[in-house]
Image (tube, helix red, strand yellow):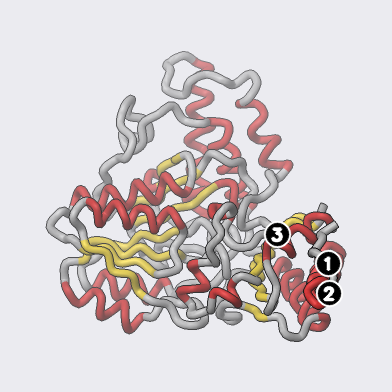
Amino acid sequence: MIYLDSNATTQVDPMVLDAMLPFLRGAYANPSASYQSARGVRSALESARQPVAAMIGAARVDEVIFTSCGTESINTAHQSVRHLWPDRAGLVLAGTEHAAGIECAKRWRESGGRVTEVPVTQQGRVDLAVLEQALATGDTALVSIMWANNETGVIAPMREVVELAHAAGALVHCDAVQAVGKIPVDVQAVPVDFLSLSGHKLHAPKGVGALYASSRVRLRPLLVGGGQEKGRRSGTENVASIVGLGAAAALTMAEHGVSRLRDGFEDRVMAGLSDTIIFGDRAHRLPNTSCLGFPGMDAAGLLILLDEAGVCCSAGSACHTASLHPSHVLEAMGVSAAVASGMLRFSFCRFNTPEEAATAAAAVIRAVEKMRALKDDASGPVAFS
């Protein structure tokens, strides 16, 4: 198997698994208990907070709140701002946000708030001029923008977004689930107020994430109960996975070698299929992400052929695998439904090899050529075997 779907989830790094195992075996005490074995578990949990804070450049470790996932973190930030700033009705987000952000926006509107969707350019970047206009109403509470898009890998101009939002008196939440661990993220250099991240996107396990909440702003917890995480997120902590997230954060690097894999893969595909489209701003995208369009092709059929060839990729967001409609991200970029229906996303990680990239590119070329031959053959039904 050649796994090229790391934007959907990553394999757990063996070093991360080794760090987790003691807390799945003997060190299983509840970290809130008072006896000695529990104090050791609590110490490990708190020790994991430091590398996560360092990974995003947080000034204080207590600005990091452990959650179950990126989606919970996003919901927490949105609902907190909506409740604590009721006199500011506005939420501004981009048309290319993840499903978690889009669904939070629906709830914002249902609560009586106003939601403004800022368009993106044909290259997938936020239109800053329109964002500035949207903020001119003066009653925006929150601007929520992805640092990097999960489908195209396009990186947002976050510094400019923050400057415009703060000048208008609005807070900024950043969905950095895809950015953290792939490009440098620094919440002091780019002073967002909230930032969401997820462990399973950076070689930690599923079921753990974090919310950065700046000490400058108030936070209303989404989950209440026993008062864990200093009252900001109740529920007994998932210690093993939190330790894993801390280990993964300590191993995180800007994966410069991954861009060479991605670029080599794209060069091979383009050489074999010259009409291939690369979606998104090629100068501002994640080093691991390749969002390709194959004109006249059906992504579902290509996925079947590539699966048979042992290549794992996706036709957009893993959160919408069962959906029949084309990507809302490409739609927001002005791509027609006919062209978007032939889109595949390939996302690399540090465990991939140049040989895998070359083999995968050859498999893509064969799959497209086979589908073209089948379309040209009107004598019988299409068969994917």
Figure check: 71 above or below 271: above
Residue under circle 1? Answer: 380
Residue found farthest to the top: 35
User: Is there CB contact under 8 Å for labels 1 and 3?
Assistant: no
Query: Which of label 3 and label 2 is nearer to you?
Result: 2
Whether residue 246 appears in this view of the structure is yes
Label 1 CA crowd tier, 10 Å (few <14, some 14–19, many 20+): few
Work out how far the residue at label 1 is from the one at label 2, CA to CA, in angstroms: 7 Å
Task: Give amino acid for label 2.
Answer: Asp
Q: Which circle's residue, 1 or 3, is located before the other in the chain?
A: 3
Residue at 49% of width from left, 44% of height from top? 69
Residue at 69% of width from left, 77% of height from top? 296
Task: Give amino acid for label 1.
Answer: Gly
Residue found farthest to the left: 87
Q: Position of residue 124 (x, y in %)?
A: 49, 77
User: In the image, is 118 to the left or to the right of 329?
Assistant: left
User: In the image, is 293 to the left or to the right of 49?
Assistant: right
Residue at 55% of width from left, 56% of height from top? 323
Q: Secondary structure at mark 1?
A: loop
Figure check: 323 above or below 21: below
Which disc, if any, is residue 377?
Answer: 2
Whether residue 349 appears in this view of the structure is no
User: Is there CB contact under 8 Å for labels 1 and 2?
Assistant: yes
Q: Secondary structure at mark 3?
A: loop
Label 2 CA crowd tier, 10 Å (few <14, some 14–19, many 20+): few
Residue under circle 3? Answer: 313
User: Is there CB contact under 8 Å for labels 3 and 2?
Assistant: no
Residue at 39% of width from left, 58% of height from top? 102
Q: Quadrant of the C terminus?
A: bottom right
Q: Quadrant of residue 131?
A: bottom left
Residue found farthest to the front: 379
Query: Which of label 1 and label 3 is nearer to you?
Result: 1
